[in-house]
Image: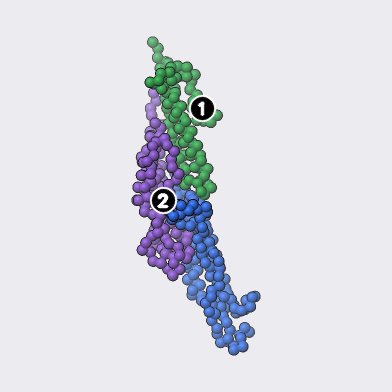
Amino acid sequence: MNLFGMLEVSGSALSAERWRAEVVSSNMANAETTRTPQGGPYRRQLVVFRGRPLPRFPMLLASMRQTPEPGVRVDRVVPDASPLPRRYEPGHPDADSSGYVTYPNVNPVMEMTDLLSAVRAYQLNAAAVQAAKNMIQQSLQILS
Amino acid sequence: MTNRMIDTPITEALGRFLDVDVARYKLISTNLANIDTPGYHTRDLDFRAELRRAAAEASGIEPGELQPASFTPVSRTVRGLMERPDGNNVSVERESLALAEAQMKFNLGAQLLKDQFHTIGLAINSGGSTS
Amino acid sequence: MNPISSLRILPAEINSASLAPDSASEPGFRTALDSAIDDIQQLESQAETKVAGVLGGNGADVHSALIAVEKADLSFQLMMQVRNKIVSAYQEISRMQF
């Protein structure tokens, strides 16, 4: 894997972080959605990242030299299993028999923190891309 | 004859320096890509040790022999880093610093190498005429 | 024919003169030139392979390929100078009148 190959690794991280930011946006947009097309309130979603396995990794080399996995991807987008808050609102159209409405388990503060983290990770990987680009360009000056 | 004049110890050493630096960059870049991967641990290499190892590997070759495949560095997990709840211990500060360092070293190495080749070129082409 | 092989074209007089490897003790300019030209062709093909591999993402690193290119180029320049010196030295000698 040379520098050009590493651009793909950074690129995969950029994609994954952007996906993560999009999930945050979706959570925020649906923070008050008490009725989804599937019925029931919206449930917060979160992404799980996973490193991509190396292609054709020789096992002997793996035991001697632990090379890290190149690239990263969003493994799955899973619903947050934490409990859904209920508020007493008897007049609400989605209230149940006891007058409680079940709301999404989206906490705007936590979503913002998540978003900031995704943005920072995105910026870091963009910096890595810049670095690779810079090194490739600097290499050219070796030629007289 | 030609090899010794162009494959000088300096150009060889600078080439190895760039090899190790690029190898380190690859590790840094992979760390950054995995900054949110659960359970991922930061990896790095010992710059000086790898330089020495590359030099040792190179000195074992006779001039004229085939050069070995590209140098494969030994990476190791970095100790002493704080681990977050998801098991990930990549530190933004550490990687950012390392990234800047790697770039500066590369620019330095490339510049020096360029100067070396320029000097060798001058030596080759500036010999006086024989008239 | 590629540029490197054209280095082997020396003026006809040099080939026929005693610069040809007659004696075992003195190989002469011609064989030294030939072996150096072979070296260059090897360097150039190595450089070519490295460069071709660079863009694929899995080949040699850019800097490594460019170093190989530069070394091949310098070797070529060196050979050009050596060849030119051989030719001009011969011409100088042939100009001498006795």
On screen, residue B104 above or below A96: above
Chain corresponding to blue in the figure? A
| Label 2 neighbour load within 10 Å: few <14, some 14-19, many 20+ | many
Chain C's colour is: green
Q: Position of residue A57 (x, y in %)?
A: 50, 53
Q: Position of residue B55 (x, y in %)?
A: 36, 44
Q: Looking at the rendering, in which quadrant would you find the C terminus of chain B?
A: top left
Q: Secondary structure at mark 2?
A: loop
On screen, residue C17 above or below C8: above
- Residue at left offset 46%, top offset 30%: C37
Q: Using the rendered image, report if marks 2 and 1 lie on a common chain.
A: no
Applied colour scheme: by chain
Pointers 2 and 1 in contact (C-beta within 8 Å)? no
Nearer to us of marks 2 and 1 is: 2
Toward the right, the furthest residue is A37
Query: What's the chain of the residue with tag 2?
Result: B
Kind of residue at badge 1:
Ser
How far apart are labels 2 and 1 at the CA level?
42 Å
Tally of numbered tags? 2
On screen, residue B25 above or below C48: below
Residue corresponding to mark 2: B73
Q: Secondary structure at mark 1?
A: helix
Q: Position of residue C45 (x, y in %)?
A: 50, 37
Residue corresponding to mark 1: C6
> Toward the viewer: C51 or A113?
C51
Kind of residue at badge 2:
Pro
- Residue at left offset 38%, top offset 46%: B54
Chain corresponding to purple in the figure? B
Query: What's the chain of the residue with tag 1?
Result: C
Quadrant of the rendered image containing residue B41: bottom left
